[in-house]
Image: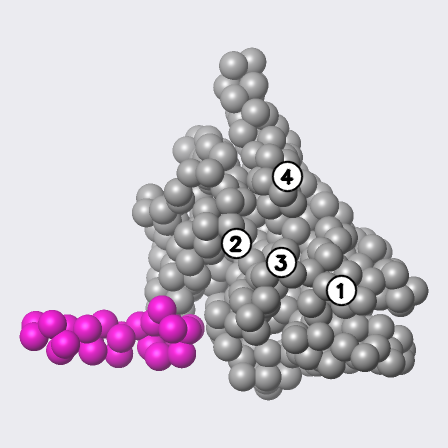
Amino acid sequence: MPNRTLSKRLRLSAVAVALTSLLGFSQAQADVLRIGVASAGGGDPVTFSGSSLGIVRNQQLLEKAFAGSDTQVQWFFFKGAGPAVNEALSNQQLDFAFEGDLPQVVARANGLDTRLLAALGVRSRVYLAVPKGSPIKSFADLKGKQVAIFRGTNGHLVAINLLAAHGLKEKDLKVINLDTGSTLAALASQGVDAAFGGRELFKLRDQGLIDVIYTNPEEDVRYTRQTALVVRGDYEKHHPEQVQKVVDTVVQAARWASEQDNRDAVLAEWAKTNEPLASLQADFPQPALRDNVSPLIDDFVRQRYQAVADQAREEKLIRRPVSIDGWFETRYLEQALKTQGLQGYWSAYGADGKSSAASTAQAATVKSGG
């Protein structure tokens, strides 16, 4: 029943898409470029972390790129995360959006016409936390317990996969759908027995309020979530020059964030959300950020998106199958890489997220006798 309810709620954007078509809303004008972020954000001015787009926001790179033109850049932040962003996209209130894989898949299944342009934060971890002193020490102890999960977001399916890996299903728990802020409050007050979340959990851990009992120590890519930049299909069709400039700027920021010498500066930029620097350091333990901020749409990203689409249907979060074919529009990214001399700068990974795409292709050729 909970999944059917969620599926119904997530499909509401399809109604908005149909109404938009019937009522003949005009396309977004080129003098305003509106970007939606699937996060409530933080700081003053409001910003967000963990992505090269956060660097673009903080350093006003888009505003600088469009300086002297008639284009005004506007940023919008959504506490309701991906589902709320989808509603705004379907109502043509946004032109571009930063959101996670599952919400993007749901939108596509519901008929929302978007083009996926570039990765903006990949391999993001999902953690499991419990109130301090809890008797819950492992996944096996979750059965029958009240567990917070932010449903419909890109962490939702990861939580399901982690449960399955330990012999559990959502129905084995008393799942409570809470957004990020509500999850933190519930954990701190011991209003839930456990919760899945992101790096925001480390702040409570460092305050001595919770224990984080799962951190994906093996860095298993199956238990990571991906985010990307999408543009409305109609906007992309009518404003390709605007789209190219946005992707150019994202790639510029990704290059800066990928340089090892800039690691401390990148984390400092992300900490402008008022997130503790220690939380960011805990979430990004590896010295190099290059793989996390790579904009490439490689075999790894493609495989993860198709896997999310297939599982979303299996879980009845969507009714129609979704294929990535024809969805990813990489010509803007390819042009940006060429113009900035960055072809080959980032590693393109195979579907397993570990081997290089080139070696995977070579191995497939040898196996087939080619």
Task: Please provide the residue range marked out in magenta.
Answer: 344-370
Residue drawn where x is 49% and y is 34% of the image: 110
Nearer-N-terminus badge (1/2) = 2
Residue furthest to the right in view is 189
Considering the image in quadrants, where does the C terminus appear? bottom left
Nearer-N-terminus badge (3/2) = 2
Q: Circle 4: is it few (<14), some (14-19), or many (20+) Cα within 10 Å?
A: few
Nearer mark to the viewer, of 1 and 2: 1
Give the image location of residue 350, x and y in percent. 34, 71
C-alpha gap between disc 3 and disc 2: 20 Å
Tell me the element at label 4: helix
Task: Write down the residue under mark 2.
Answer: 101
Query: What's the mark number on residue 145?
Result: 1
Give the image location of residue 32, x and y in percent. 62, 34
Tell whether 117 sits left or right of 29: left
Task: Write down the residue under mark 3.
Answer: 170
The answer to whether the residues at label 1 and label 3 have Cβ atoms under 8 Å apart is no
